[in-house]
Amino acid sequence: MQLRALSDTLFVSAQIQVTDLPAIAAQGVRTLICNRPDGEGADQPTHQELAEAATAAGLRLHYLPVVSGRVDDDTAAVFGALLETADKPILAFCRTGMRSTTLWALSQAARQQPVETLVQRAHEAGYDLGAIGERLNRCGAGAATRTDARHTVVIVGGGAAGIATASSLLARDPKLDIAIIDPADTHYYQPGWTLVGAGVFRPETTARSMARLIPRGVHWIKAAVAGFEPANKAVILEGCRVVRYEMLVVCPGLKLDWTAIPGLAESIGHHGVTSNYRYDLAPYTWKLVQELQRGRALFTQPPMPIKCAGAPQKALYLSCDHWRRHGRQGAIKTEFLNAGAVLFGVADYVPALMEYIRRYEVELSFGHTLTAVDGPRQIASFTRTRPDGSKETVEREFDMLHAVPPQTAPDFIRSSPLADAAGWIDVDPATLQHRRYADIFGLGDAGNMPNAKTAAAARKQAPTVAHNVIAALKGQPLNGRYDGYGSCPLTVERGKIVLAEFGYGGKLKPSFPAWLLDGRKPTRAAWLLKERLLPPLYWEAMLKGREWLAKPELVG
């Protein structure tokens, strides 16, 4: 955590954590301004969590969220008013500090402060305000005519899909000029969070420095994307910087919308409300599982699409397995409330899963969508769809609630020309080329392909995109094909997994012969694959361009 001074009374920083607050208070800060909307990052506490911890530390937090690239005059005016009226010193923060810096500069420019002075102060704090002289609050009409950087291939997103694609490109052409745009300092192995929530993995084993993982020779642009100008082959960054490309690969992941369910953001991490979908909460899941002796445990699943559709029930099975092993199954009543109509989307795996539903005495409730959480009273509200299509609200008391939030494409994707009507990147499901822009490709969780949104899917997509990008640069036909492969290792008990592997249309696509590993049955071999082999395969193969069992399918 680094506080950077913009004035005698204002500091800015990147995202802070609850554990940072005592140190911040010790430095004399009196007020916090949160400029980052909830749900942007996997390791991001909600502003309510920070506000509660800030109060305990003697601080006050103001929530003034700004979507990346959308700083406007009205928000800047509110920011300026807070600077005038709030107790000082003040710390403003967002993902990197850029939005907070832009708000400050715009608010001061409105007070007739010299633009050159504001730009200099921001530069000294480590922030480039770019086109502030034209229009500080947005990239003006002349922005796309500038070029702050130019690369042959630009990749938006430094997650699993982005780094794997960069590595696969370099494996095909080591001299290729590639840049990855991502503001995060930390890269997460998110498939491991299921096992963190079951006490199998330590959380720190699922996190590594982004700087360690960016492939050698690839330029890392540590910034957030504000928008796209496909006609000008330009990506617009926060601060109005412009990055140009010959080929663009877009894979920013998706957004967990914690605030879409009233009360969830305020309750998460407290009152028995948890989720394995966040790095800092998976350990809380394990704490709750260990401590719960009796009562009612609820596990929810929102409407599709979501990342790793099996993850909500993985948490259910591993929790129930722990309670069963410790003689608490009869004392703890469990319910799985699924917004969908089936337990799992590929029917071949349902019989094995239903055996565990019966073993753990789980009450299944389909057509139930979580719509509100009252943490202090420990009541969850659901909208239930009746057989005739009508809806009603039902309430459930709980002692533990594993909640999975609704999920959407990131805001800067949904508002861009790259999006389809539902907000996802609009690509051909086989070639992964954008349907309207031949020089743009999309993959990973933000794409609109009708496949499972899993790391295993990205592992297969990345080589296909790399192959087709190289072909496009050479003016050759795109003969690389992605078949919709996805994998979901369903952890039905500690030590056994149902290894679901399937492609488009639910077609089974096993990686191993049935005599060696039958994915339709719970096996110890699949557990060892998940626990022992998949993490090193992720870190040392997928992210380094080694395409074991992931070579693209070529046609023609």
Image (tube, grey):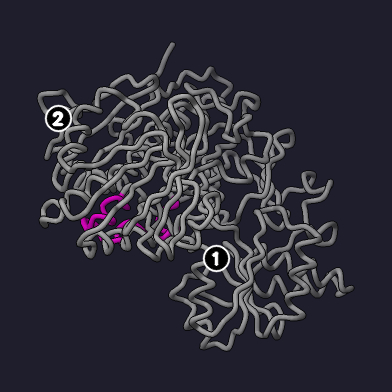
**Residue type highlighted by circle 2:** Leu
Residue 162 visible, this angle: yes
Quarter-of-image position of residue 499: top left
Image depth: mark 1 or mark 2 in front: 1
In the rendered structure, the answer to whether residue 275 lies left or right of residue 422 reads left
Given residues 479 and 435, the one toward you in this image is: 435
**Residue on which disc 2 sits:** 517
On residue 323, the disc is: none
Which residue is rendered at x = 77% and y = 72% of the image? 80
Quarter-of-image position of residue 73: bottom right
Q: Write down the region rendered in magenta.
A: 192-214
In the figure, 45 relative to 488: above or below?
below
**Residue on which disc 1 sits:** 47
In the figure, 301 relative to 214: above or below?
above
204 within the magenta span: yes
Tag 2 secondary structure: loop
In the rendered structure, the answer to whether residue 328 lies left or right of residue 239 reads left
Q: Residue furthest top?
A: 556
**Residue type highlighted by circle 1:** His
Which residue is rendered at x = 37% and y = 31% of the image? 460
